[in-house]
Amino acid sequence: MLQTNKGYRGLTHPMIPIETEGGTKYVPNFRYRYFTEDIPCGLIVTRGIAELAGVDTPHMDDVILFCQRMLQKEYIVDGKLKGKDLHSTRCPQHYGFNDIDTFMKVNHYIE
């Protein structure tokens, strides 16, 4: 999707220069919105819905675990969305949803 969606064309991830013995190198800016907004308000939401539906998301979990380390946040604990920073996300679990049926009904996806 990121490679084929025209809306993402031309976007790059901001980098921060760091000085090393070998010269200047660049590392990702982990405080940029791709991490600080897109993770808690995008990827975590999708992961939360998948958890309610009982769908395993091993690759998504790998990305989230990496990002939560870089952001010094805690979203996933023991394979579940129950970390101390869940309050800063928009995932269904933050709003008290524990099952897909209730989530779907309350949000008017089904009757």
Image (cartoon, rainbow, N blue to C red):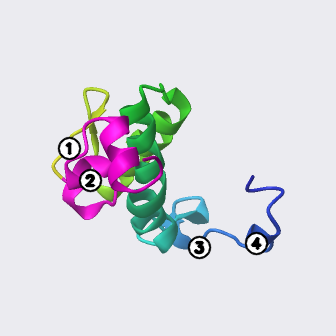
What residue is shown with label 1? 83
* Alpha-carbon span between mark 2 and mark 3: 20 Å
What residue is shown with label 2? 73
Q: x, y percentage for residue 56?
A: 47, 25
Sequence-first disc among 4 and 2:
4
Q: Nearer the viewer, residue 60 or 50?
A: 50
Which kind of residue does numbered mark 4 sit on? Gly
Which is more foreground, mark 2 or mark 1?
1
Give the residues drawn in magenta, as a range: 85-111
Instruction: Give the SS element for disc 4.
Output: helix
* Alpha-carbon span between mark 4 and mark 2: 28 Å
Which is more foreground, mark 3 or mark 4?
4
Write the residue at 51% across / 62% down.
20
Within 10 angstroms of label 4, few (less than 14), some, or many (20 or more) residues?
Answer: few
Q: Decide: is 10 above or below 21.
A: below
What residue is shown with label 4? 7
Instruction: Give the SS element for disc 3.
Output: loop
Instruction: Give the SS element for disc 2.
Output: loop
Sequence-first disc among 2 and 3:
3
